[in-house]
Image (cartoon, rainbow, N blue to C red):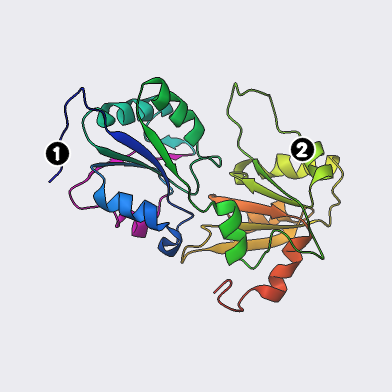
Amino acid sequence: MTQKITQTCLGKVYLVGAGPGDPGLMTLKGKTLLEYADVVVYDALVSPPILDMIGENAIKIDAGKRRGRHSKLQAETTEILIEKARQYPVVVRLKGGDPFVFGRGGEEMEDLVKAGIPVEVVPGITSGIAAPAYAGIPLTHRGYSSSVTFVTGHEAAGKYRPEVNWTAIAQGSETIVIYMGVHNLSNIVTALQEGGLTTETPIALVRWGTRPEQEQLIGTLATIIEQVETTNFEAPAIAIIGQVVELNSRLVGYGGVGE
């Protein structure tokens, strides 16, 4: 039975990465915390099988954010975490992927630390690594790529700098992995070409990576926008750009990859 603790006895908040969706990729530490948590505050992209790991007596709070459908504002979510940590011993903030990779985990931890709340981070497998792997696309390969850049395709208003330097990314990395970029893909593709990438540069979009419903779209910078429009390809998806995408046709379907 879940027990409240006194206001003077603080609980602890665990920022737990749920991984990309496949429950087999959830860490043992994260799974154990879900089983024993008093409160779980979870995101929209956490898959149902992972939510099923939450103990039956835990208080479950949906704090999911999807484009155009924000369940709670970020400030509200932080306030909930602070409030619950002052009432219960074990509070889990369950985030898709890894808390510190485009997951706002750093911002939440800053606010919790300022409020005097003990915090521990439990890393998760980020979709930028897992989705390409399940699609048969190695991000590095001695014959294709020795560098990888992870970048967000969806920037917050009023952030510390006005925009991603796509020219520097185009010229400085052999493999580019873009999170949350489907809605802004046309502008990103144009910026990368202006930065020096050719129209024949391969690109892959992987939607719902590692889940049973995973699907992918393979093309080039010249064709991908029309392909997205023709197939009604939608978020959430990871974009992988670079010559490593060519390996998909050789690796997918073998050894469990892409099956």
What secondary structure is found at the residue carrying circle 1? Answer: loop
Q: Is residue 51 magenta?
A: yes
Q: For the point 55% across and 76% down, which residue is it?
A: 256
Q: In the rendered structure, which amino acid carries the disc numbered 2?
A: Trp
Q: Which residue is mark 2?
A: 166
Image x and y of residue 192, in percent: 79, 43
Residue drawn 58% across and 44% down?
Answer: 180
Q: CA distance from mark 2 to mark 1?
A: 50 Å
Q: Is residue 227 magenta?
A: no
The spot of residue 161 in percent (x, y) is 68, 24
Q: Amino acid at mark 1?
A: Gln
> Foreground residue, 156 or 235?
156
Image coordinates for residue 12, horizontal then vertical, percent: 31, 35
Q: Quadrant of residue 188?
A: top right
> Image height check: is 59 above or below 125?
above
Nearest the camera: 228 or 255?
Answer: 255
Q: Which residues are magenta?
A: 46-66
Q: Mark 2 packing: few (<14 Cα in 10 Å), some, or many (20+)?
A: some
Residue 150 image label: none
Residue placed under numbered mark 1 in the picture:
3
Residue 63 appears in the rendering: no
- Residue located at (50% from left, 46% from top): 98
| Nearest to the observer: residue 112 or residue 224 | 112
Circle nearer the N terminus (2, 1)? 1
At which x and y percent is residue 165? 76, 33
Q: Residue furthest bottom?
A: 254
Q: Residues within 10 Å of mark 1 (few under 14, many from 20)?
A: few
**Which residue is more in the foreground, 213 or 108?**
108
What secondary structure is marked by label 2?
Answer: helix
